[in-house]
Image: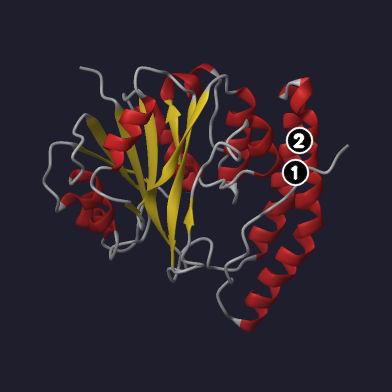
Amino acid sequence: MEKRFSIIISAYNIEDYIKRAIKSVLEQDFKNYELIVIDDKSVDSTLEKIKEINDERIIVIANPENKGLGAVRNIGIERAKGEYIVHLDGDDTLYEKNTLSRINELIGADKPDIVFLGYQDIGGFNKTHLSTKENSTKEARLTCDANFSVPSKCWRREFLLENNIKFMENIYYEDMVYSMTAVILSKTTKYGEFPTFNYYRNRKGSIMSTPSIRRCSDMYRMLAYLVDLYDITPKEYKKYLLSFIQNETKGLPIRVDTIIKALENGSGTPVFPKRNYKYEGE
């Protein structure tokens, strides 16, 4: 029987958290899935911790060299056999034991290209972020995605393959470009008003808590890639994409200044307020 889900866990130097993430999948009451855990050449004991879990449902991939999050996720998708892809960062967890059951029930007999879901923010603003009827239209997602995080969505694998939708590699904010591309190309979507994973913010050493000049420059690179999406965007939705680009451009100087100050002070990057852009047009 075809697997309903391929759960892809990306792991890099998270020896204290990876077992927690894997356990949150193995304890699901829904069993028709495969679990792909990819270690991105960790220099701590992350890979050893993964191998300590003896379960035939786990497919372990050990990268021979560090490739970055975008490349890791691409590897996972290439290896996946499930009808739907669920991503999970190795320092996060699925929300509760019936999470996959709820997603499966939501999809039902339909074949949505994307399922918009929610998450529980822990250690940041400690809020629950949900997908709703209002924020899950294509217009809303292009104007300001309720959450660009890839794990907050469930992805039909054939849709991704047919449209050659891949993560950009060697760049921060790959989630944003990936999500926007998929929304533009999607034909059918669904949403679920429930959280599907716990997002643990501000972990020491995490990508988003560590300031760097590269993060600043990649913000502008990301905008350039978003502009390139204009040509593949249907005419009726172009204005919403442009509205997002305009709003993001206005906010970038503040974000860059915050990161540079954190870099100069030797502190971690603070949690940025959630984007709440409105359509700027007629």
Given the current orientation, which residue lies at the most extreme bottom position?
265
Question: Which amino acid type is marked by label 1?
Answer: Phe
Can residue 67 be seen by looking at this rendering?
no
**Mark 2 in CB contact with mark 1 (< 8 angstroms):** yes
Question: Which amino acid type is marked by label 2?
Answer: Tyr
Closer to us: 208 or 119 = 119
Residue underneath mark 1: 244
Percent coordinates x, y for residue 28 in the rendering: 21, 43
The quarter of the image holding the N terminus is top left
The reply, left or right, for residue 210 in relation to residue 225 is: left
Mark sitting on residue 240: 2
Count residues near mark 2 (Cα–Cα under 10 Å), then give few for <14, some for 14-19, many for 20+.
many
- Does residue 235 sit above or below 73 in this rendering? above
Closer to us: 37 or 185 = 185
Closer to us: 41 or 258 = 258
Q: Which of the 4 image quarters holds residue 79?
A: top left
Can residue 221 be seen by looking at this rendering?
yes
Percent coordinates x, y for residue 167 in the rendering: 54, 37
Q: CA distance from mark 2 to mark 1?
A: 6 Å
